[in-house]
Image: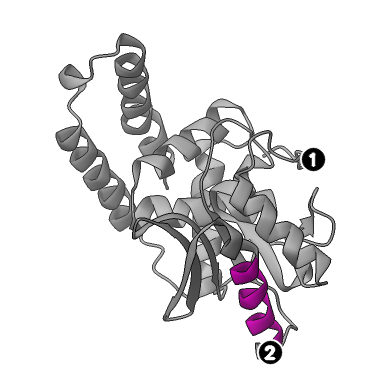
Amino acid sequence: MTRETPRRPSRIPEYAEACLQALVAQGLGGAISLGGGLGLLHYLDYRTTHDVDAWWSEGWSAQDRRRVVAAVEGALAPFGEVSTRAWGEVVSVELLREGRAVFSFQVAHRSAQLEPSTPSPWAGVPLDSFADLVASKMVALVERGAPRDLRDIFAVCQADLVSPRECWTLWRRRQTAAGSDVDPARARLAVETHLARIAQHRRIEQIADPDERGEAERVRAWFTQEFLNAIS
């Protein structure tokens, strides 16, 4: 697995930038660590993302975390209606347009971390390590299996930032650290099920654009023939 230096993504959503700048200005950047799709884009700038997913950092009080939420709410207020909701160990501040969420800033409690967070191009806002970003994306791939999860894992492997076998190793390390299931048969079946669901929902022959159709065929074949065979 390569050790890339994180760089500021070229296409930062306006709302995300406003939120991060507000946290830095109020000295609250260290209360979170950037993860998710935006975090991964600091290592491979290959697509756009509309939201921010982050983890709470250790050592910050409940009051500090409330201040973070208030800072994000204040940053988004000039853009429209703001709604904050919480479930379990997750809080999400959302920007609404015509009653529909167009952006969310979501922070969760972390169940496990493989490596310390690293400084990011955003002064004062830590960034998850590449290992943690891939491990978290692998958990999402197995548990959720959204098309973007498949695309992200495919992209980082095709860019030679990590191999399929290393992806599964990071998944296993993350699951073990969190006290979660590490059964490879269950994980393989889960990914196969997600692939089948996506194939049924978006059939290859129904994709009109030839470039998109070719890319879909390539991604699905890679997962079936290479990625799933790397699990052990």
User: Which residue is at a point 60% across and 52% down the rendered structure image?
Assistant: 15
Which residue was labeled with disc 1?
5
Residue 36 position, x and y percent, is: 55, 53
Residue ID at (62%, 28%): 160
Residue drawn at (60%, 27%) of the image: 159
The three-letter amino acid code for the residue at tag 1 is Thr
Residue 128 visible in the displayed image: no
Q: Which mark is residue 63?
A: 2
> Between residues 127 and 73, which one lies in front from this camera angle?
73
Asked if residue 71 is among those painted magenta in the image, a careful observer would answer: yes
Between marks 2 and 1 in the image, the one whose residue lies nearer the viewer: 2
Q: Residues within 10 Å of mark 2 (few under 14, many from 20)?
A: few
Q: Is residue 148 above or below residue 135?
A: above
Q: Quadrant of residue 200?
A: top left
- Residue 13 image position (x, y, % from top left): 60, 44
Label 1: few (<14), some (14–19) or many (≥20) C-alpha neighbours in 10 Å: few
Write down the region rendered in magenta.
63-74
Residue 116 in the image: above or below residue 1: below
